[in-house]
Amino acid sequence: MIHDLKVFFTLIAFNIKVTLAYRASLVISLILNILWVVSFIIFIEVIFQNVVTLGGVSKGETLLIMAFYYLFTNISDIFYRDSFEQFGEKMRTGYIDMWLTKPASSRMLMFMSNMRFDYITAIAVTVALFAYAFRTLNSTPDIHLLLFGIGISLIAHVIFFSVLSMLATLNFWLEKTDTLNMVAWQLTQVGRYPRAIYTSWARIVFTYVLPLAILANLPAEVALKIATTESIIVFFAITITLYIVSFLFWKKGLTRYSSAG
Amino acid sequence: MTPIIEVKHLVKKYSFYKKEPGLMGSIKGLFRREKLYVEAVKGINFSIKPGEFIGFVGPNGAGKTTTLKMLSGILYPTSGEIQVLGYKPFERKPEFQKQFSLVMGQKNQLWWDLPAMESFLLNKAIYEIPDELFKKNLDELSELLDIKDFLDVQVRKLSLGQRMKCELIAALLHSPKVLFLDEPTIGLDVVSQNAIREFLKKYNKEKGATIILTSHYMQDIRRLCDRVVIIDHGALLYDGTYDALHTQYSDSKTLEFTLAEKIDSKEIERFGKLISQKENTYTIDVPREKTAEVTGKILETFNVDDIIIHERDIEEIIGEIFTTKHVSNHQ
């Protein structure tokens, strides 16, 4: 575990060096992120010009959920999105062979070797969104609750990583699951909006079966001190279960790996 | 001496779907397709002692790389037993992985966008190489391979030969006891090939590392390997020394001689089978055990300007082994 952590931090340093080798993409990434976030803020502003609440959730609360959502996607974009998107191709062409011989967590090497620190500028934009959300809420954030919410958001990555890992593992049977990956990323959009807007069955599915609605909602609820103890316990239970299941599934998948010529 | 690698009845089967050509074939494949099986490795057995340098030879698709991938834990065997350094490779235990290395001529582990040195530092963290050992090995290996000046150049800007040298350094920084090399000299120019060969020979002798090398270049096998293992269609056809290949499987030698004057070829055919004639130079095939006797008779009978005795081309012998499927063990 400690060794894998050391390797993880080395991979971070390594990928930062790769990013700094191509400086122009940092600037382009910053501009695109600003445009992306601003467009969604405008979208929310337009909605709340016509309604007072969205499923009982106020504009400030909706903006806070959005901020947590962007924080979530920023981190997934930086640390593992590219690796998951490239995994299918690398598996089919045998380019994962060398990683399988290394004495470190094979999942970490497969899915976290290609980090994108050119997206780091997006975090600055997300911080601005947090500030705007709290300004709209007309309240000063409780720093402890905010940090707890951010902590929950980071742990939520274990859920999403586990879901993506299971989809990636299907490549060992199906050989090509690029569409499934795309669907998974699109489904994270579910977490962008308050859970309350979904019908009961959808809320159950996206909370307990494919827990994508809680990726941003629960951290926001924690920061706003409206999360229930039950929801936090369920969250940790889902996290641990999904991690174990995805790990065992990955091990099984590796026995089917056939490399390439 | 206890073998460092032991393989018993090793089998690897792949399944794949047959795809008919053309658009209609692809559409048909959506509804019905034929599943086929291929046995890439068919129950091979061999063992390797510590410090040996073994060459795996075989045509494309013979099963050499598949065998290497099972030995390094990349592939899960269908059946059979493998032990490398006392471990089962497919269990991928970190204690095992820290003791071996794999270099593939057609795949690299270095990162394209950064200098090779950065990949070395990443390997240092992954293999938990102590600082002192890392520096010592890096200095020694970069000196031996004469690549010191290129360690800080982006890998994508290095030549193929330079990249392969850096790949070898990356593979050897953690001082592995076992080294698997899959066609390490493929695509390299003659100078680079010679440099890599000399380096591997020296490394094997000085460090006592056990090396398995697959290659299509017989020069690699001839100059480096103590033992040759010939594989074809997944089956082990020969396992023995390089010299024994000649004595056991080549029952003739070739005599090439130049006479002072041209003579009737029928005169030459009294001594052996005439293979070629160019002006006054004749090449004949004679039985191995009669080589000395025939050479003496030719020297007595004719006015000879020059005479050379050749062993049969090793590629030819191996090609014959593939066709006649000898199974032999000469250790």
Image: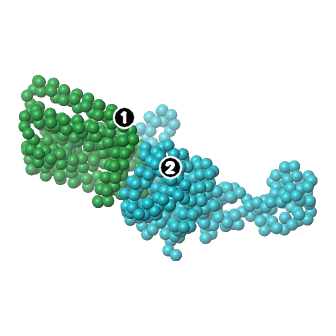
- Colour treatment of the image: by chain
Which of the 4 quarters of the picture holds residue A240?
bottom left
Q: Is residue B88 visible?
A: no
Looking at the picture, do discs 2 and 1 lie on one chain? no
Kind of residue indicated by mark 1: Ala
* B203 vs A177, nearest the viewer: B203
Chain shaded green: A
* Residue positioned 22% across, 29% down in the render: A38
Chain shaded cyan: B
Q: Quadrant of the N terminus of chain A?
A: bottom left
List x then y, in percent, for residue B65.
52, 55
Q: Secondary structure at mark 2?
A: helix
Return the residue at label 2: B150
List x then y, in percent, for residue A160.
25, 45
Return the residue at label 1: A24
Badge 2 density bin: few <14, some 14–19, many ≥20, Cα 10 Å: some
Q: Chain of mark 2?
A: B
Q: Is residue A116 left or right of residue B302?
A: left
Kind of residue indicated by mark 2: Phe
